[in-house]
Amino acid sequence: MIKSKLTALCTCLLLGSHYTRAQGIYLGFESGVSMNRMQTNASGRFFTNYQGLPGIAVAAAVSWEVNKWLALQTAPTFVQKNYKLYRTGYFDGVFREFHNDYWQLPVMAQFSFGTSVIQGFLNLGAYSAYWSSAATKGRQPVMWNQGDRDPASSNKIFSRNGGQTYNEKYEFDNRKDNRREHGWLAGAGIRWMPGPLSRIYLECRYYDSQSDQQKNYMLNRVGRYNQTICISLGYQYRLAKLNRLF
Amino acid sequence: MQRLIYIFFLLASTFIVCSYGCKKNLVVLNPPNQYTTAGYNDIFESFWNGMNNNYVFWDIDTTNWDNMYRIYKPLFAQLDTARDKSKVRDYFRAMTSGLIDGHYSLKLLGSLGSPKTTIYPPGIQRSAEKRHHNRPPSLLKLYGNISDNYFDENTAYFKRPYTYLYFSNPVDTTIFMFGKIKNAPKSEADNILYIKFNRFELKSGYGNRNSAVIRSVIDSFFSHVHDASVTALIVDLRSNGGGSLDDMHFLVGHLIDQPLHWGYSKYKNGNGRLDYTPWVKNIVTPQPGGKAFNKPVIVLVDVQSISMAEMTTLALKALPAKKTVIIGERTWGGLGGLTGKYDSPNYNGGKFTFGFDPAYGEVYTPSGQVVDLDKRNYEGKGIPPSITVPYDEQSWLGIKDAPLDRAIQYIRTGQ
């Protein structure tokens, strides 16, 4: 029953009414995947590397079409900016994952081009974000613990010192963790407009943080900057009543 | 359309300029042992950075390390290469004076270390200057006092009422002794087992090729500790300077039949001073032949109980029977875990040398922090006893031993 109602609603939204385009306000949502990279320098640490990890991104999108080719858009977003720190060689198996949840508010100018049915668009703007929560998991050699007897770990660190796995909430350190983030964004996408009131789009958006994930708490601090790519599928609906205002 | 493209490229250019124009702080860190020997400026930089990235107690240490940089970098820069060695020592001494690390030492090498110089934080020096630490009695005499006055010579338990065991492995003489405490006159017979050793080199001694005697004595202890008639165990860790972490399993692992979670540890996890792993569990693994020891355990400690002696105290306190009592004085407060000289990369921190062939100096410092099951951190403070028995020099040198008397009293009276 619910499924059929949802199907009917979607059909109305997608195909409903007039095939004329007009400037106005669009409201919608988008969701997709994120891939974050931690931009830093691990040069002082032996056999240590950083690796990006995937996450999810969900947003509510509001877009104001100024004219046929320019729109202003914002999209309050929940996005995960995950990454992994891992070691290689003798230290193989030592790793730590950070699963970071951010609430993010991007503001962007959107430039559109194409036909009345298929359009391409480009986004440029800035964003501000708040690091709301985090979890961490990994495996760490413990110098007090007896080494694994697993032959697979022979000649590796875990044969000498037993490992402990952990998977827990990350407790923020107010001295170190900078929970506010801001930066630039750029994106590109393609949209399909089945009717004058609705549009579906696929977008790839890149967020480049300009703020260090750490506070300025020490000299010779090596910065850490999130660089996040989000690929999202979105739907927007034109608010007809508000359109009359413009 | 053309106007759109122009505007977009204008904005895109602005974006790129802003992105790359905003300075990102991606400092390249040089390992402290890769600095040249160009002068005092490099000496300072290599030491300061080595400490900055390898010292594991920055989250609880009150030393303002950035201030040390601001104050001492200009002072080092003013030094003259040939003449100012003594000032260098003074500066290093001042920079490290507030460190809480109970193991810390800074050994100056090469021309800086002539005459031989090792710098300890004053807190450690103060502890070391206390009472008997300056003039310890002969260990043999001390051990002899206990065995002569407290051990039961009439027991059929052992061929001899006590055993001295010497072995030099790897470098220091280890004395191991155990026996049965004499029964109290006119009271119900009990069977209190007592063990004392001066450093944790039991497993290495046991594994020594020429260690048949050592093995037999330690095996004898392990078999007797599980004798049904034993009513309590006294583990005397006074003046025990620590040693090999392997002995945690070797000794405590014989008193359990299930893995024993006794505390947590954490390690450096990045270049930042406050980059740490989460607290992870420290576990003792039961050893072959290990059985749960469910009787009272008394741990005797003093201010000279250091490092593994303190960690073992925490492990014994965590025994599942919850019948462990710590008697004596507050311990030293050096619970950090030390690695071998070249193993600090295993844990992203700890010991390091600074300067480059020849090195200027060597810093002796742990690679991991340890806390107890309640995550109480005793570094620089020491573990407080459950029952305090202050140090008494006459007891130490004479025939009576007040902490040991108190331990026996506690076992026999429950108070």
Image (cartoon, rainbow, N blue to C red):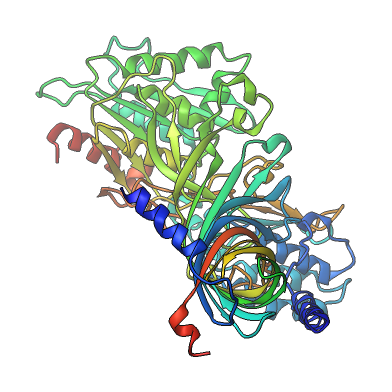
Seen in the picture, residue B225 relative to B413 is either above or below; the reply is above
Q: Position of residue B197 (x, y in %)?
A: 45, 31
Q: Position of residue A66 (x, y in %)?
A: 62, 85
Q: Specify whether B30 is left or right of B153.
A: right
The residue at the point 74 percent across, 67 percent down is B26
Q: Can the viewer see residue B413 in this picture?
A: yes
Q: Position of residue B357 (x, y in %)?
A: 87, 52
The residue at the point 35 percent across, 17 percent down is B161
Which residue occupies the extreme front position in the image? A18
Q: Position of residue B20 (x, y in %)?
A: 78, 74
Q: Quadrant of the N terminus of chain B?
A: bottom right
Q: Specify whether B375 is left or right of A107.
A: left
Q: Quadrant of the C terminus of chain B?
A: top left
The residue at the point 24 percent across, 24 percent down is B182
* Foreground of the two, B388 or A93: A93
Q: Specify whether B302 is left or right of B175.
A: left
